[in-house]
Every structure is written in structure tokens, then in C-alpha cells.
Image: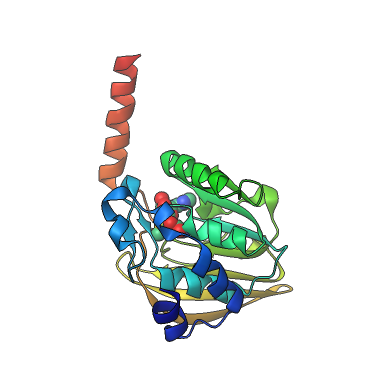
Amino acid sequence: MVQRQLRGRGIHDENVLAVMAELPRELFVPAGVLSHAYMDDALPIASGQTISQPYMVARMTELLDLRAGMRVLEVGTGSGYGAAVLGRLGCSVISVERHPELADTARARLAALGLADAVRIVVGDGSLGWPAEAPFDAIVVTAGAPRVPAALPAQLADGGRLVVPVGMRARQELTLVIRAGGTFETHDCGGCVFVPLIGEGGFAEPAGESAQGRRRRWFGRLLL
Ligand code: SAM
């Protein structure tokens, strides 16, 4: 995976390559797709979400230009794999996930890997960032947004970097925002396809999902 999919495609940050070479991706994928753990693809996980393609995890992490000790916000914990990469790079990470069940599973995985102190997983709408703990040296959004979520650039420290896929639901441009004092430089870094960022700074919740939520709440009341 590292030689062909990452180094072979131009990932050159040796720290990112070393961490992804030793972090077992199979611990982050469901049993049904275990044999695909090192394939060049995003894979389905619970709650209709995905664990991102290894190349995309490496590319986004490299664009953040991280050093040990940096404070990083990840929006979209998913399986916890991306958060584990950030933690193994020596960063202090807050990772926000909107699905509590994904957050719980990821938390258990990271604890088993000894990363519970390095990575704090919280549940909420990460499209608003995590203002209580701002500023961050880096912010990575692992879901596609219709525009750069308005709350995020202001939560960067001076010199901080934000990476976020921006575009339509079906396809986005990987976008890098670099803060220099009060100004924000934006760079396009290539096409990508991510599940949608759902929330105030993202897309509206799909109608089907809220209907399902309503059904769950209704049955929940019945069972009580
Ligand atoms: N980094 C993840 C990994 O390594 O498995 C991949 C995450 S997946 C591509 C995107 C995640 O973003 C999903 O788990 C989804 O539930 C989450 N998400 C979408 N909108 C969100 C929001 N507003 N706040 C927090 N998480 C969100």
C-alpha cells in the first residue's frame, strides 16, 4: 500500500509514510471487507459512512504539514483511522463525529492502540469546528462541503492550515486554506470524492435520514 499507492503517487512526507506503514488499517474496517483493507479504495463502515482511501488520508495529512506537538482538529472521525494517523504523528487531536455509534467504536479502537491521550473523540456538528478548543495548528475535514465552512478558518492559529474537500455532493476539489495573520490563502489541490459533510456549515441532512431518526425516536418512546 505504501510503496505503490502512496510513495508511487507522489506522497513524500516520510513521517506520514512511516506511520501509515506501521498502522494496521485492518483494525479499522468491518469484518465483511477485511480482505480489502489495503486496497486502493474507500470502504464502507457503519452508519452508511466510509473509511477514506489510503492515498487520500496520506495526501490530506501531508498537506497539513504537521510536526509533533501540533494541535489538530479532525472533522469526521469515521472509523478512527485518520485520527490514529494524526495521533501517531505525535499531534494532539480533537476529532468530531456526528454519529455517536461511530465515535464509540473509534474511541475503543484508539484506546486499544494506546492513543486515548493523544486523540479525544467528541460528538457534534464539526462543520462549526470546535470553538471551545480553538485555535488549531491544523484542521482536516474528511467529508465534502458545499463551500469552506465559514466557522473553520477563524479557528486556525496564525500559519495554520485547513484541508477540506469543497464542491458538489458527487465530486469535490481538495482545498487548502493557509492563515497568515488576518488573510487566508486558498489553493486547489486536485479532485476528490467524499461522503457529504452534514450540518450547519455543510449540506442539509438527507430527508431519509431524519425520517429514520424520527422512527427510532418513536420506537424508543414505545419501548420505554
Ligand atoms: N477520517 C475517517 C476515517 O479515517 O475513517 C473518514 C471519515 S468519512 C469519509 C466522513 C465522516 O464525516 C463520516 O463518519 C461522517 O459521519 C462524518 N461527518 C459528516 N458530517 C459531519 C459533521 N458535520 N460533523 C462531524 N462529522 C461529520
Judge from the rendering whether residue 92 lies leftward or rightward of residue 7; answer left or right.
right
* Vertical comparison of 109 with 69: above or below: above
Q: Is residue 79 visible?
A: yes
Q: Quadrant of ligand 1?
A: bottom left
Work out whether 100 lies above or below 169. Answer: above
- Image quarter where the N terminus lies is bottom left
Left or right? Give the position of 106 relative to 63. left
Colouring rule applied to residues:
rainbow
Residue at 65% x, 71% y is 66
Q: In front here: 160 or 78?
A: 78
Residue at image x 73%, y 62%? 69
Q: Is residue 197 visible?
A: no
Q: Nearer the viewer, residue 48 or 110?
A: 110
- x and y percentages locating residue 196 in the rendered image: 37, 58
Q: Residue at x 67, y 62 (%)?
A: 90
Residue 207, quarter of picture: top left
Residue projecting furthest to the top? 224
Q: Is residue 142 above or below residue 30?
A: below
* Total residue callouts: 0
Task: Find residue 185 and report its horizontal and vertical position in percent.
Answer: 61, 79
Give the x, y percent position of residue 212: 27, 36
- Which quadrant, please, contains the C terminus? top left
Camera-side residue of 168 and 72: 72
Left or right: residue 118 compared with residue 16: right
| Residue 71, percent from left and from top | 68, 60
**Picture quadrant of residue 145:** bottom left
